[in-house]
Image (cartoon, rainbow, N blue to C red):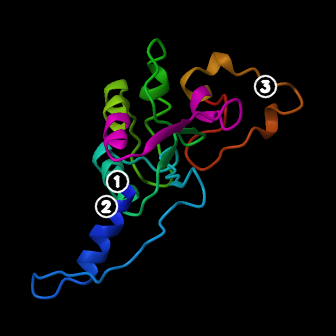
Amino acid sequence: MHRGLTTLRRLVTARDVDSAASLDRLRIPDAPRFARRGLSPDVARIAHDVETVRRVIDLLSLHKLNVLHLHLTDDQGWRIEVPGWPLLTEIGGAEARGDRPGDHYSTEDVSSLVQYADERFATLTPEIDMPGHASAVFRSYPTRHTPSSSNAASTPSWGGGRPCGSS
């Protein structure tokens, strides 16, 4: 029903002339080709606040997309609060790509975004990329990183922070 009403709203808005809208009789076969249609903003590398994510969800709904895939972890940042592991957001979430500030989403933020998306017929899908792209984790908890002698000298930095295991 939501998608059909969205189509109808777009048609009426497009034909609005002097605040009077009309439509000719028509049949619209309006079904999605794919079950999952979405967008994946990379909030791990470039942090976005909750209001920006809400605006993205509104745009998803307007364009009849139904999945917001949030890339929450990468070398440049850890963007989601994990109870019992506070340094992930305090240290791992403090940076972002380039000169942008870091940030993170609290568990309350995530819950509110999930509800907001659900009210707009979209699903919020989190991505926590492990074990790859883990520099933000190792900056937060360096004792979790045990480089082997073969890769210790070549541990890379991927633009957002210091190389893994550095102080």
Q: Nearer the viewer, mark 1 or mark 3?
A: 1
Residue span colored magenta: 114-137
The residue labelled by disc 3 is 147
Callout 2 touching callout 3 (CB < 8 Å)? no
Query: Looking at the image, which residue sits at the far left?
Result: 19
Q: Nearer the viewer, residue 160 or 127?
A: 127
Q: Is residue 160 left or right of residue 49?
A: right
**In the rendered image of this protein, does residue 34 appear above or below residue 117?**
below
The residue labelled by disc 2 is 5
Q: Nearer the viewer, residue 26 or 84?
A: 26
Q: Is residue 36 left or right of residue 147?
A: left
Q: CA distance from mark 2 to mark 3?
A: 55 Å
Residue 136, picture quadrant: top right
Residue visible at 33% across and 45% down in the picture? 49
Q: Earlier in the sequence, mark 1 or mark 3?
A: 1
Q: CA distance from mark 1 to mark 3?
A: 51 Å
Q: Position of residue 66 (x, y in %)?
A: 47, 50
User: Dot 2: within a 10 Å radius of its alpha carbon, few (fewer than 14), some, or many (20 or more) residues?
Assistant: few
Residue visible at 50% across and 31% down in the picture? 92
Question: What kind of residue is marked 3?
Answer: Pro
Is 23 in the magenta? no
The residue labelled by disc 1 is 2
Q: CA distance from mark 1 to mark 2?
A: 5 Å
**In the rendered image of this protein, does residue 142 appear above or below residue 61?**
above
Element under label 3? loop
Query: Looking at the image, which residue sits at the far right?
Result: 150
Callout 1 touching callout 3 (CB < 8 Å)? no
Element under label 2? helix
User: Dot 3: within a 10 Å radius of its alpha carbon, few (fewer than 14), some, or many (20 or more) residues?
Assistant: few
Question: What kind of residue is marked 2?
Answer: Leu
